[in-house]
Amino acid sequence: MRADVLTCLALAAASLLGMVTGGRNSGRRKNKEVFLGENSKFKFGGRIDYKLKRQDSTKTLLIKSEQLLRIEEHDFAMRPGFGGSAIPVGIDVQVESIDSISEVNMDFTMTLYLRHYWKDERLSFPSRNNQSRTFDSRLVKKIWVPDVFFVHSKRSFIHDTTMENIMLRVYPDGNILYSVRVTVTALCSMDFSSFPLDTQNCSLELESYAYNENDLMLYWKNGNDSLRTDEIVLSQFFIEHFHASSGLAFYSSTGWYNRLFINFILRRHIFFFMLQTYFPTMLMVVLSWVSFWIDRRAVPARVSLGITTVLTMSTIITGVSSSMPQVSYVKAVDIYLWTSFLFVFLSVIEYAAVNYCTTLEEMRKMKRGKIPSTYNASQAMAFDGCFHDNDIELTPFPRMAPTLTSDPLTSPPQSPDIRPIEGTRLRRQRSLRENVDLLVSNSYMIDSYSRLAFPLSYLLFNIIYWSLYS
């Protein structure tokens, strides 16, 4: 019994001793693993604070950049070199596209890359390989940047897909490149006196809002080469020229400011308006002349043709006016449309004159008995819509007496000493009343003259119009 008790106690003591020894060895292994891990990290680049390692790596890099640039040590609410000479800020622009041009609102929309160049020694940092550092918009909000704005802009915004399109590049010597992609809608004062044969000169103006020329000097970084453009194609305009210029702007309360101009000249494509406006207008005018070849007794045909052309011209004029700004001066297209409308209107008035003269001629002939009293003009034209002059007995024109210009072989010889008596005329001129009576008695002559006068007049108008505006 006693031996069994001693054996049990020995086994218990041995197991307890094994447990204690195993716990110490495991603790040593764990410590050894940590120590080897630290040594391995130290071998590849030094010790690392494990608490710092657990933080966000992007924030860690930003904190290091702020420390490198010593942002917390300076007041970036003040411009570089405050109290000294004006800080020069270079500008260059790359125009990506001209999105739209509105004649009604007199503005244009442009997307461009705006780049600023200046030097801020407060942001200089040591570098062995002289490499720059590039940042996004998060660091831009903590340093000083030029406050350039667009003069006469209506709307503008910085693109933010997928991040804000802002780039900041800092060089070791403190030189800075700040680039932003922006879309701006700005005013363009257009002159439509020659529309649609016009050429528009628009400009986008850049200026510092808070700093006048004593604090900030804006200039084109590379002169005329500071303005670059991609291949831009517009639907209604052709871009003739892009060029940069600069000047000064004065405000009575704050002084003089440097101002930069992005100028571009737009020439309108005429082919669209030729198809939509000019060709239909010409066709309507020519169509109104068809009535001159229709018998003057065909009242329904000539009246309906005249009214149709007048209404069509009114529709064309209304359509053009609705797509244009309400300006207080006459445009070139207005001159053409309203002159063409006048030709169409005069063709209707011409038929009214022909019909009136024909009616007077019939009344005179009825009074003279040349037309039977039972004759009805409306019944005569009911069959074919025409009035035939063969149905009426017309008196021939009286034979005129021979004049001095007649054939010398047939005229009797005259004495060369005969002189016209004082107070007499060689040829009597018709009075105005006689000319009117002649037209009334021969109303068909109005149509004959109109067939020649209207086309020649319209052709002369077109020659003058296109020579002046084209």
Image (tube, grey):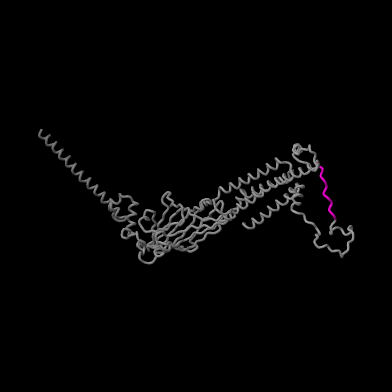
Q: Position of residue 239 (x, y in %)?
A: 55, 56
**Residue at position x 20%, y 44% in the image:** 23
Q: Judge from the rendering whether residue 437 lies leftward or rightward of residue 399; answer left or right.
A: left
Asked whether residue 144 is in view, the answer is yes
| The furthest residue to the bottom | 85
Q: Position of residue 267 (x, y in %)?
A: 57, 56
Q: Judge from the rendering whether residue 353 lies leftward or rightward of residue 13; answer left or right.
A: right
Q: Position of residue 271 (x, y in %)?
A: 61, 51
Q: What's drawn in magenta, residue-wise?
A: 392-401
**Residue at position x 78%, y 38% in the image:** 375
Near-viewer residue (278 or 393): 393
Residue 33 in the image: above or below residue 254: above
**Residue at position x 70%, y 45% in the image:** 352
**Of helix, strand and loop, which mostly describes the magenta segment?**
loop
Q: Magenta segment: does it hold 397?
A: yes
Q: Position of residue 124 (x, y in %)?
A: 36, 62
**Residue at position x 58%, y 48% in the image:** 320
Q: Judge from the rendering whether residue 325 lies leftward or rightward of residue 368; answer left or right.
A: left
Q: Magenta segment: does it hold 370?
A: no
Quarter of the picture containing the C terminus is: bottom right
